[in-house]
Amino acid sequence: MNQYKAFLFDLNGTMIDDMQYHINAWHKILNELGAPISLEETKLQCYGKNNELLERIFPGRYKDDDKNRMSIEKETAYQETFRPHLKLIDGQADFLSSAHNAGIKMAIGSAAIMFNIDFVVDGLNLRQYFRAIVSADDVQNSKPDPETFIKCAAHLNIDPKDCLVFEDSPKGTEAALHAGMKCVAITTMHTPDEFDDTNIIQFIDSYSSRLFQLLINKN
């Protein structure tokens, strides 16, 4: 029997290699708003909901309506820049197809808003693979809180311990740890030494049939 009954995927940096585009978009916006923040510091701030990022940089400065507007403006700028490069990480198309054919349930658990998730899922025609999508709009608490992945498991009707998470960020692997889930870490944005969670079973830089066979046959 397969050890894992469900695969839960983060989106940005995990399914598509786009995090540098998000970092660049935020870096431009934050500096225009008066925050003299470096690209490296912007990278460290790129986790959780957009509104939370703005609140961390500008505590108490903006009302929710303003933050929501800036969030959409940022994502629109990101999409316009990244659209010509929109593609899955190498090997993932076959990986998703193999998991689907094997009867493994799959979900997306992302801190992105649905505006961005739809951009990727529909732009790459992936919706048939995912039985559930949990976005920033669906949770009260962002990663590293486990709420996103716990909700994914609940929507799939799968015990959290039977779920395997795919993540590209330390905050994401920490969320999986808090959810009681093992994790595969994708090194698109962070190097292995930047992760310290004991639930990581493997580091990868792309997907492969060998990885799929290893995961479904793991005892």
Image (spheres, rainbow, N blue to C red):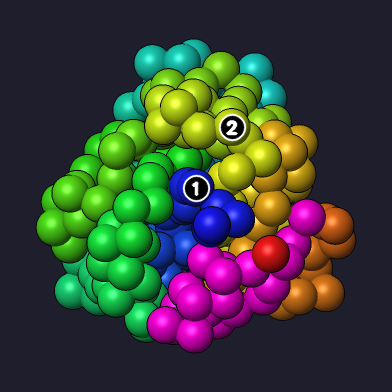
The residue shown at (73%, 38%) is 180
Quadrant of the image for the N terminus?
Answer: bottom right
**For residue 78, which numbered disc appears in the image?**
none
The residue shown at (75%, 44%) is 177
Front residue of this view, candidates 69 and 205: 205
Q: Identify whether 83 is placed above or below 7.
A: below
Answer with mark 2 or mark 1, whichever residue precedes in sequence: 1
Tag 1 secondary structure: loop
Q: For residue 201: magenta?
A: yes
Front residue of this view, candidates 10 and 41: 10
| Amino acid type, label 2 | Asp
Query: CB under 8 Å between callouts 2 and 1?
Result: yes
Residue 37: tell me if it is visible: no
Q: Position of residue 45 (x, y in %)?
A: 65, 49
Tag 2 secondary structure: loop
| Amino acid type, label 1 | Lys
Q: Which residue is mark 1?
A: 5
Q: For residue 29: magenta?
A: no
Q: What range is drawn magenta here?
A: 199-218
Q: Identify whether 199 is placed above or below 153.
A: below
Quadrant of the image for the C terminus?
Answer: bottom right
Q: Identify whether 130 is placed above or below 209.
A: above
Q: On the picture, is 94 further left or further right than 64? A: left
Q: Which residue is mark 2?
A: 159
